Amino acid sequence: MRNHPPDGRQTGCDLLIIHYSLFIMSRNIAVGIDIGTYQIKVVVAEQIHEDDKTYPRILGTGFVESKGLRHGYITNISEVSRGLRLALNQAEKTSGIQIKRAYVSIGSIGLSGIISNGLVMISRADSEITALDTQKSIDVAREEIPPALSQNRRIIYEIPIKYKVDGKEVMGNHPLGMKSVKLEVRALFITCLEHHLKDLVEAVEETGVEVIDIVAAPIAASFVTLSKTQRVAGCVLANIGSETVSIVVFEDNKPVSLEVFPIGSTDITNDIALGLRIPLEEAENIKLGSITSTNYPKKKLDEIVSARLSDMFELIDAHLKKIGKNGLLPAGIIITGGGSSLASIEDFARSSLKLPSKIAHIIFPEKEKGKIKDAFFAVALGLCIWGWNEDEDSTGRLIMGSPVKIFSAVKDWLRPFLP
């Protein structure tokens, strides 16, 4: 504990600390932590308002190789914490900011989206729909989730997809102020396995960093890799990680589905190593198109890579069929993550899904380009953008419980997506 002079005066050191704290508080700075199976990434960013525009300015970054994870979930909390400390130290050194609180992504195979419907009768005598009615409809939708889909799971947030007033679909974001007898809602509930969530929070807090909020990694990445035009028209953002493929489907500027599959680019590396009988390190270099000393038949390599990509895109296509969106997303598929660096993946996605296809890039002002390479830090930067909008009004409510304190604040799901 710092000792103060007996007369209550503050020392020069105390004043310096106070002034530094006020300086940091006066700036809208947020920290995003993306704990992936392959790498841990940290971004420190400041929200800049300039020329009637708002954009993120990168102050510092940090990244290290991940240890203690499998398919996105934590298998060794201590190893993850050690790696995160190194990444945090890098970010603090490059930004000059001491990191005490952060927004954290979750993207393991335990993450999933559930669609449910709720119907309520309007409570007011004059039949006007109020916020109480919309919340009651979402509560009913949550209660309608089958127990088999909610067992051992935590709902981390709820997203109303569409409302109906007396059977007619409401145009716009909400039906508040309209007259009706009954109100229906179709909502997306993002869930994760409770023990995965607990382990993630524990690993972060072991480093002395407070977890402000948990956000689904695919949602966070969408804030900086998708344009409003793409989200409105309809698209699927696919993050091909080392051991998982996560997708989020957008329509009418809202996420309407989310899923994570236990397959990733590491499976391609393993297949190449087995098929060509070469070390894993050599297989990884070949997968990325690096020049190697190994001679191999290109036709056989293409067959190996194509077989595993087929598995990935069959899973994506099956999910799109399940939600009735296969071949019906005008903005197509946007690919990000480490697996997006495969030379043939864009064409393969186009032919497999019968959709337009492109590789994601962070949407940045010209003056900020080059500070972050491609979409490498997309999730961590997206977390910062989420943080800057956390105090806004909402149509999507956070339902966080222990070990993360309950968040009573609500977020406007559309606000982070606006240009």
Image (cartoon, helix red, strand yellow):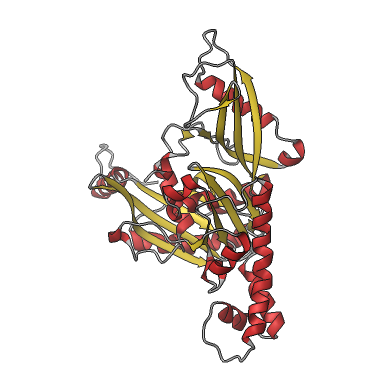
Q: Closer to the camera, 229 or 159?
A: 229
Query: Is residue 241 placed above or below 212 in the rendered structure?
Result: below
Along the horizontal axis of the image, is 154 left or right of 44? right
Query: Is residue 65 placed above or below 381 in the rendered structure?
Result: below
Query: Is residue 341 placed above or below 227 in the rendered structure?
Result: below
Residue at 50% from the left image edge and 67% from the top image edge: 64
Please state the horizontal and vertical placement of residue 115, each as a whole percent of the image.
65, 39
Residue at 45% from the left image edge and 53% from the top image edge: 226
Along the horizontal axis of the image, is 283 left or right of 364? right
Q: Closer to the camera, 194 or 356?
A: 356
Visible residue check, residue 208: no
> Residue 270 falls in which quadrant of the image?
bottom right
Q: Closer to the camera, 256 or 25?
A: 256
Please state the horizontal and vertical placement of residue 268, each as a whole percent of the image.
65, 73
Residue at 71% from the left image edge and 39% from the top image edge: 150
Please state the horizontal and vertical placement of residue 382, each as a whole percent of the image.
45, 51
> Residue 387 falls in which quadrant of the image?
top left
Query: Is residue 377 placed above or below 162 in the rendered structure?
Result: below
Residue at 71% from the left image edge and 82% from the top image edge: 275
Visible residue check, residue 173: yes
Q: Residue furthest top?
A: 125
Q: Which residue lies furthest to the right in this view?
A: 148
